[in-house]
Image: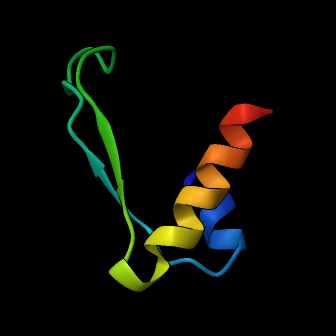
Amino acid sequence: MKLRLEEEGIPVVLFDQRDSSYNAFGYLYLSVPAEFEERALELINKDTDE
């Protein structure tokens, strides 16, 4: 999803909260500037609906 947003010109910061030993536990968070929020959500929702 990070690459998809960046392809659309939306700057993205990725926060990796996964356990460094297993990578199976924890979360990844994407953060975008507020002015890109609406467009980012549109793209995310479109990609997850398909």
Examine the rendered structure and indicate whether residue 12 appears above or below residue 34.
above
**Image spot of residue 28 (x, y percent):** 33, 39
At 44% from the left and 69% from the top, the residue drawn is 12
The quadrant in which the C terminus is found is top right
Judged left or right of residue 5, residue 36 is left
Q: Quadrant of residue 47?
A: top right
> Looking at this view, is 22 or 27 the one in front?
27
Coloring scheme used: rainbow
**Figure check: 3 above or below 27:** below
Question: Vertical placement of 10 versus 29: above or below?
Answer: below
**Which of the 4 quarters of the picture holds residue 40?**
bottom right
Which sits in the foreground, 20 or 31? 31
Residue at left 20%, top 18%? 21
Residue 3 in the figure: left or right of residue 25: right
In the picture, measured across the screen, residue 31 lies left or right of residue 46, that is left
Q: Please state if 2 lies on the left or on the right of 22 as rendered.
A: right
Q: Position of residue 44 (x, y in %)?
A: 60, 49
Query: Nearest the camera: 17 or 10?
Result: 10
Number of marks in the rendered image = 0
- Look at 68% across and 58% down and name the residue there: 4
